[in-house]
Amino acid sequence: MLAGRRILLIIGGGIAAYKALEVIRLIQKAGGSVVPVLTRAGAEFVTSLSVGALARSRVHEALFDLTSEAEMGHIELSRSADLLVVAPATADLMAKMAGGRADDLASTLLLATDKRVLVAPAMNVRMWEHPATQRNLAVLRSDGVLMVGPDEGEMACGEYGPGRMAEPAAILAAIGAALGGGPLVGRHVVVTSGPTHEPIDPVRYIANRS
């Protein structure tokens, strides 16, 4: 489904970050490759070692990486991917995106890209329902940012409601849809044309040449 596709996965700082590891596995199983970006807050929940081992790729964390930035690495990263995915997308990350802020690697990549962006929101239900978050959500949607989730359920904090990050399988399906994936991806189709027959009765018909 994702053969040859390159996904830039930004992992935000939330308890749902552990699900990003399964997202990486599913993308690779579908034939895609993952370039991971781990935010400072995200690194509080999953390690660079585990992300890099699963992605089989270098984990990008710092904006001011002298080796990468000598070649304008943040621009290259954002342009070489087929799709940018933010999972989990925290309230802070969504606020940065809506406001056009670029004060770390993740937000700079999101501002510098010319590719489609898919976000999987994940936060406490009160944060999700807050007017500020809903305003940011409306701005992002008007900017063409794609959304998957959030789901409704029990939170890590014990509250219940919308705010749970979508399950990895749902995120994978959303990635496929964003990239135009479908049941015919990878298939070769031959279309032939011929004469048209319009029946008059069971025996006779009107036809035109091919």
Image (spheres, rainbow, N blue to C red):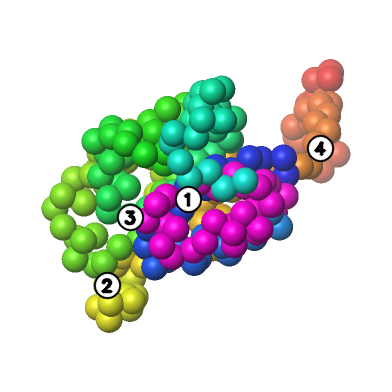
Q: Which residues are magenta?
A: 30-57
Residue at horizontal 72%, vertical 40%?
A: 4
Q: Earlier in the sequence, mark 2 or mark 1?
A: 1
| Residues under numbered marks 1 and 3 in contact, where contact means CB atoms less than 8 Å apart | no
* Residue 17 x %, y %: 45, 62
Report the Cα–Cα distance between label 3 and label 2.
16 Å
Residue ID for mark 4: 188
| Between 18 and 41, the one nearer to me in the picture | 41
Q: Quadrant of residue 195?
A: top right
Image quadrant occupied by the C terminus: top right
Residue 90 in percent (x, y) is at: 33, 55
Contact between labelled residues 2 and 3, with CB atoms less than 8 Å apart:
no
| Left or right: where 92 falls relative to 23 | left
Where is mark 1, residue-wise?
38
Query: Mark 3, mark 2: which one is toward the viewer?
Result: 3
The tag earlier along the polypeptide, 1 or 4, is 1
Along the line of sight, the residue nearer the viewer: 15 or 143: 15
Tell me which residue sits at (46%, 41%) in the image. Answer: 62
Q: CA distance from mark 1 to mark 4?
A: 38 Å
